Image: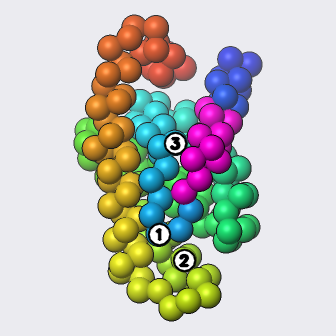
């Protein structure tokens, strides 16, 4: 791995964490605009690790503490890895919603109040779908019209 790749990975991880911390979203309604960045894994598997690290860093501020760092990072990693192996951007955009059941379980077990797993998980799934699929895909497609940005997003190992 060269310096350019390490630098790009660090910038992506930091940007994800900063966007999440600037507009905090923890708990059952997680409209994290930083989740739009998960679509980078669709374009290049390189981004799986930086985005997972960014998620872990952002979750350090979570009210659920280290458990959210572990569970949130696991959910993100599984979604990102799946996205990186998918050929269709619309299908890829669904994976963050699918793996949000991990966060639903986390909230159900860690909440001090009784929590309906299906309700909480459904809320997280909907918020992920809205941010990544409904908002994220059009944003990424618009951004990709800019040739300079498209070059930045395209695979680094080409």
Q: Earlier in the sequence, mark 3 or mark 2?
A: 3
Look at mark 1 in the image and give the residue it sits on. Answer: 28
Residue 153, percent from left and from top? 47, 22
Using a 10 Å C-alpha cutoff, classify the residue at mark 1 as few (fewer than 14 neighbours), some (14 to 19) or many (20 or more): some
Compared across the picture, whether 78 is left or right of 52 comes to left
**Residue 76 against residue 114 in the figure, above or below:** above
Residue 107 shows which numbered tag? 2
Residue 60, percent from left and from top? 73, 58
Q: Answer yes or no: is residue 81 visible.
A: no
Tag in front: 2 or 1: 1
Residue 88's image quarter?
top left
Residue 104, percent from left and from top? 47, 74
Q: Earlier in the sequence, mark 1 or mark 3?
A: 1
Using a 10 Å C-alpha cutoff, classify the residue at mark 2 as few (fewer than 14 neighbours), some (14 to 19) or many (20 or more): many
Q: Earlier in the sequence, mark 2 or mark 1?
A: 1
**Residue 55 against residue 150 in the figure, above or below:** below
Compared across the picture, whether 55 is left or right of 31 comes to right
Distance, label 3 to label 2, CA atoms, is: 20 Å
Numbered range of the magenta stretch: 12-25
Secondary element type, mark 2: helix
Residue depicted at 66% across the width and 57% down the height: 59
Q: Answer yes or no: is residue 61 visible.
A: yes
Per the image, is 52 magenta?
A: no
Residue 20, percent from left and from top? 59, 47
Residue depicted at 46% across the width and 14% down the height: 149
Residue 120's image quarter?
bottom left
Look at mark 3 in the image and give the residue it sits on. Answer: 34
């Amino acid at each position: 791995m060269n310096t350019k790749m390490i630098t790009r990975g660090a910038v992506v991880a930091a940007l994800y964490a900063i966007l999440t911390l600037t507009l905090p979203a923890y708990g059952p309604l997680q409209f994290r605009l930083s989740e739009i960045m998960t679509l980078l894994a669709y374009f290049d598997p390189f981004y799986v690790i930086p985005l997972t690290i960014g998620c872990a860093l952002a979750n350090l501020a979570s009210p659920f503490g280290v458990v959210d760092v572990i569970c949130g990072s696991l959910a993100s990693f599984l979604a990102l890895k799946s996205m990186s192996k998918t050929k269709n951007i619309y299908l890829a955009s669904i994976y963050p919603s699918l793996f949000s059941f991990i966060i639903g379980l986390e909230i159900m077990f860690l909440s001090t109040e009784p929590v309906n797993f299906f309700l909480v998980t459904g809320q997280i799934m909907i918020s992920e779908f809205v941010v990544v699929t409904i908002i994220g895909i059009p944003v990424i497609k618009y951004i990709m019209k800019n040739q300079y940005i498209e070059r930045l997003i395209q695979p680094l190992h080409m």
